[in-house]
Image: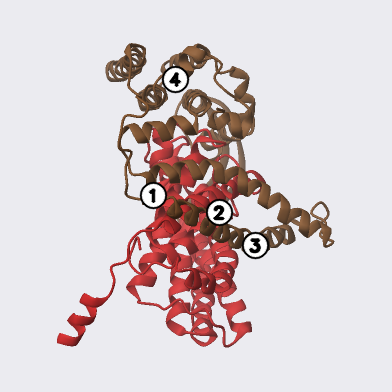
Chain colours: A brown, B red
Amino acid sequence: MPTILGELAGVEARSKKYMELHVLAKISLPLFISLSLPFAKEPLQAFTLVIASAAACAAAGVPLSALKKYLAVIVSMSAFIVLAFSLFTYIPGRVLFEVTLWRMQAEKGVFEWKIAVTDTGLRYSAAFILRIFAMILSATLLLASVTDRDLVWGLLSLRMPFGVCVAVSLFFRGIFLFVSDFHTIREAMIARGVDFERTSLAKRFMLYANALIPLLSLMITRSYEVSLSLESRGITPGSRSASGYRLYRMGLSDYAVVAAGVGLMLTFAAWGWLA
Amino acid sequence: MAGETQAREEAPRRKVTWMHIVTFAFATAISYVLAVVSSLIFPVLGAPGVSALYIAAAIYVPLGIWMGMWGCLAGYISCFFLGLYPSGYSLVQSFVWSWADFIEALVPALIYKGLKAELDFTVKRPRAAKLLLLFVSTGCVLLLLGVVIQVLWGATYGEPFTTAYVALVYIGTALAAAGIILGLIAGNPRTWVAQILSVIGASLFSGIWGAGTLTIFNFPPPLPAELFWPVFVGWVVGDLIVLSVISTALLMALTPVFKRTGLLVRGWWA
């Protein structure tokens, strides 16, 4: 069964042992990494968290090349962060570079817009950028190791109503159904003479907007068919799984992973508190 | 009074059916796909997951009006997964940030229910219906720019920023007022006023929460607080365009279908 990121971007955890863990353990490790993020305020703390997240990914067999999928995110956020600390605000500190872009005499003083790079600004930028890496690694670890079947079994073991379990399952199946529907509608538009390559951005926006009406109509038709088939099987949304048809319990290794996550978070909390 | 009570007693209790759940699940899936597509095609650079034209909002916002809480949940879950991939936010950051889209669907639902507006999008004057949202959106964008100029520079430096603020606010208000007047003559006045308020309210409140959780309050905010205004303006302007153009068109085209199939909810869930 492919993982969520496996289906979306072809990236999956390769460690068999990690993949066999209980879904709660697989969710809790990235959760505790993300809970450690607020404590990583200094570049060294953030860097240590990046190393810990990368180690967790490596242990789970998630290829670190998955970061390539987030390249646009990393580049754009990093650039924006540096701009924020040098162009949009002045961070007091030792000035390394300064240039005034616009100077104007206003009613209550002189308005100046300048690029000012200070050592403190660079330290803040480094901490923010490193945290982005930790944040992305934790999201990758979660999505590359959890399958939709894991989630459904997890929900069934918690004795959640069938309505919730079916909705989760249909959400994941629905993504691929509607990607293919969207392609079909797009091809139909091309067959009628629409040239997506040559049209302007504004016109393309309107074309995509027009495609939403058949897309939603298809959704209603499909919902009708699926709900009729569920009803015909006599399943009600509120009914629950009656028996332990499939036992899904946490084992020793699951508790060990959860404990490692808690330990990581407490370490960063203590470090953040003492720093 | 007695007759009224009897009628209330006789009315069958509406229940959540598979149709609601399945439609919600599929709508969430569509919203997620569109959210990914729009944040890749029309990104607000530096703020992953934020799109200058967030087309997904055109699905779950009308869904909130048609199906109440199901639309709000569709917005929340699609945004939660958008936060994880391709935006790369952590589990907790995404959990907090995604309430922006929940709010975006909730505000119109609350407005329609609060005003007891009928979902009657019959248009008596098509030209007025086309122009009203253009006027309202442009007016709101100008108002927003005016407020941003005043908050960032006008309050500290005075002139000439104050003059720019005053001019933008006057022109923006005039355009928005003209849009509302056009709304009163376009068709059912209560419906169109509710729609105009929904477009403005949903964009504004979701923008405050969305840009706020990306820059000011989160665990931790992925972007510095200095970026609040650029992200907020990008968010609100994008939502205003999408909600006024696409979501209104979808409401007009598909409301009869939702009424016919029994998917329209009267309360919050059924």
Identify which amino acid the numbered label 3 is placed on.
Pro
Q: CA distance from mark 4 to mark 2?
A: 33 Å
**Where, quadrant-wise, is the N terminus of chain A in this rendering?**
top right
Query: Circle 2 is placed at which residue position?
Result: B56
C-alpha span from label 3 to label 1:
30 Å
Residue that carries the numbered disc 4 in the rendered image: A46
Instruction: Identify the secondary structure beneath mark 4.
Output: helix
Q: Say few, some or many: other residues with alpha carbon within 10 Å of mark 2 (under 14 / 14 to 19 / 20 or more).
A: many
* Residue B40 horizontal side relative to residue A62, left or right: right
Of all chains, the one bearing label 4 is A
Q: Which mark is residue B146?
A: none
* Residue position marked by numbered label 3 in the rendering: A214
- Please report, as a chain letter, where disc 3 is located: A
Measuring 51% from the left and 53% from the top, which residue is drawn there? A226
| N-term-proximal mark, 1 vs 4 | 4
State the CA–CA distance, disc 3 to disc 4: 47 Å
Against B238, is B109 above or below? Answer: below
